[in-house]
Image: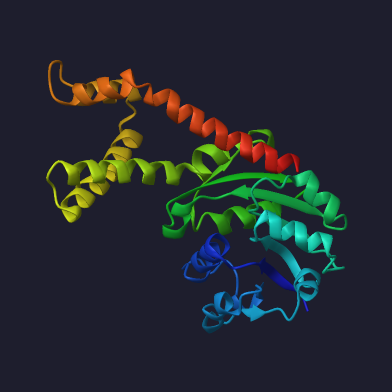
Amino acid sequence: MSYKLGFLGVGVMAGGILTSLLESSHNLIDKSDILIYDNDETKMSKFLDYGVKVAPSINFLFKNSNILLIGIKPQNFKELTTNSLFSAHPKYILSIMAGVKLDNLEKVFFKTKGFIRIMPNLPCLIKKGTIGFCEKNCTTEIISFSKELLSQCGKIVEISEDKFDVLTSISGSGPAYVFFIAEAMINAGIKLGLSKEESTRLTYDTLVGSAIYAKESNISINELIDKVCSKGGTTIEAINIFRDNDIPEIIFKGIEACMNKSKELSEK
């Protein structure tokens, strides 16, 4: 039996993509045409009420999936391929594994016709994500279906694979940087007299509102900073401290380290 879409792993990100698909009103695919497999049965159990099917084995999943979404960790993928737990190859593969290149997938799944590599980020779980996308040897139909599937979770950015490590360090890992800054702002507010609830709400609302304004205003970042910083006012005092302590360079070094780690994983 052939299923239109298979999922190897239904953890946080792959599970989020599956949930968005199952709860979408677009009827992109019949739920009975979806096949899933995960070593953790509790992760699969929450999808059973939707009518998806559970594969009895990895080999069954691979053999019967037209498009297979691989949502496991790269280290688990290495263990899977090393132990040769499968003999069948899916027709097409959609991979969200960080650091695993298209060429490496092709070497493992040498009978598979085409490959798509994506890099989603955490906001995909609330359908506000950014998803890097590149492909190799896929038909127009497969590309179109995959994009429609992913569009349930956020915006798709087509980008060449040689830029995926940078994309990973900006959008893939970026939410953690925002959370880190948010934590610093919340803690500062608490130290300066706000309650935790007050500081948290003020910080989150400010970050969300500022991001939306920056995106929709078409004003450069420098102009936006100047728009808030009145000469001789309060805001410029904070900005001067950030600049004097070279915060932009610190952020650059962090993002660069993240990118280098992504490259290291890719080379392995």
Q: Which x, y percent locates residue 120?
A: 54, 50
Q: Which x, y percent locates residue 190?
A: 18, 47
Residue 221 located left or right of residue 187: right
Q: Residue at x 80, y 73 (%)?
A: 59
Q: Residue at x 81, y 60 (%)?
A: 81
The quadrant where residue 89 appears: bottom right
In this rendered view, identify the residue nearer to me: 39 or 23: 39
Q: Residue at x 12, y 21 (%)?
A: 233
Q: Which x, y percent locates residue 174?
A: 46, 42
Residue 80 located left or right of residue 16: right
Residue 68 located left or right of residue 215: right
Vertical placement of 161 versus 60: above or below? above
The quadrant where residue 93 appears: bottom right
| Scheme of colours in the image | rainbow
Residue 48 shows in the view:
yes
In this rendered view, identify the residue nearer to me: 166 or 53: 166
The single residue placed furthest to the top in the displayed view is: 231
Q: Quadrant of the N terminus?
A: bottom right
Residue 166 shows in the view:
no
Q: Quadrant of the C terminus?
A: top right
In this rendered view, identify the residue nearer to me: 35 or 77: 77
Q: Residue at x 54, y 38 (%)?
A: 169
